[in-house]
Amino acid sequence: MSDLYIVVLIVIIFVVSLFYFWVKSRKTKKKTVSQLYIDGLKALLTDDESRAFQSLKEVVKQDTGNVDAYLKLGDLFRKRKQYANALQLHKELTLRSGLSKQEKEDILKSLALDYVGLEKHQKAISVLRELYRRNDQDNWVIDRLLSELEETKMWEEAFEIESRRIRHKGNKQSKRLSLYKVFAGKELVAQEGDLHKARLAFKEALNHDETCVPAYIFLGDAYYQDRRLSEAIEYWRKLLSVAPSMGYLVFDKLEKTLYEIGQYGEIAEVYNEILSTNPKEIHTLYALAAISEKKGRNDQAVDYYKQILENNPTFIPANMGLIKLYEEVGLKDKAKKIMNNLIKAYPLGKDKFNCRNCGYVSDEPLWRCPACKKWDSFDI
């Protein structure tokens, strides 16, 4: 009996010891996973992506229930431009049960960014719309949804969403709303050739921002295409009164159209009206110089060019105009001096328009940068 007792005791001690070491190993493992997770978070905070990636990868191997680790690991895949891997990981997370509301939203946000990275804009829009339905005041969601709608030229939906945000803020006007209507109008012309609907869109843009320069330009263009020349001139002239410094964007259009209707003589009057309130406006002075040259009044043209260069010595068109006139009358030394000064200032070339945000260069005025997608970022 005593021998049996000893055997049973030994077995019990053995089992208890096994259980003890098993529990201890489990605690050690949990501690290791927890520490790995903390290490991964710390690495993310210090932008050590490589260490964060390795730590989080190990975490999800040992603890498949750590949703946040999976989420962050997928985000790291995306940062490495491994968009397909990121998408797969995040899509698998959506299939899990028992997710909290916040976890579901975080996963959807990551999914949307994965689709953007893959340039699957319609799928990104679908996910972002779902997030917007859940919370229509989340600015992160609104900004990215608007960006995707802009990318796919869905201007009317973008307009509605931005309108709601503005109403929530208690505002009434927005330059972005007016530009959405401008681009909606341009799309109507490009896709449907519907000049009437386009004009309505441009006029609505002016209801949101009466200083919206492209709305005046494209309104005039739409009337011109319909051969309603007087109305085209009317809106281009309205631009001159609203934003005289931007008037040069329609000078060529105005001159051409006034010539077509036999009223070219009025153009000088138009330019002088601008100078009456802004006598140093260089583009207007340049336009008058060009008219003076056409009329053979070269001395007057020289005076206009000199006025321009007093305010902007490196304005290329005025410099070139002055060089040409000096050479025509044999003042080659004066012409050479101007040319040398100009070359020292910067190489000759056509006027460019630069994005203040990313430096993108365009030969024509733009109201939305095609590179960084910023609005109103060009020096026009």
Image (cartoon, rainbow, N blue to C red):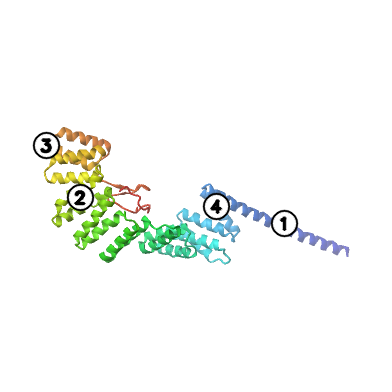
Res 366 seen here: yes
**Where in the figure is residue 18, as x and y percent of width and height?**
74, 59
Mark 1 vs 4: CB contact within 8 A: no
* Residue at numbered disc 1: 21
Left or right of 255? Residue 65 is right
Q: Where is residue 277 in the image (x, y as percent from the top left)?
A: 25, 45
Q: What residue type is labelled 1?
A: Phe
Identified at 55% across, 63% down, the residue is: 101
Q: Which mark is residue 329?
A: 3
The kind of residue tagged 2 is Val
Question: Residue 29: image x %, image y %?
Answer: 65, 55
Contact check, label 1 and label 3, Cβ < 8 Å: no
Disc 2/disc 1 C-alpha distance (Å): 94 Å
Whole-angstrom CA distance, mark 1 to mark 4, is 28 Å
Q: Which residue is situated farthest in the front direction here? A: 276
Residue type for callout 4: Gln
Tag 2–tag 3 contact (CB < 8 Å)? no
Which label's residue is closer to the chain start, 1 or 4? 1
Residue at 53% over, 63% down: 104
Of the two numbered discs 1 and 3 on the same chain, state the one appearing first in sequence.
Answer: 1
Q: Callout 3: helix, strand or loop?
A: loop
Mark drawn on residue 270: 2
Residue 297, horizontal then vertical, whole percent: 12, 42
Q: Give the residue pinned by disc 4.
A: 54
Chain-order first, disc 4 or disc 2: 4
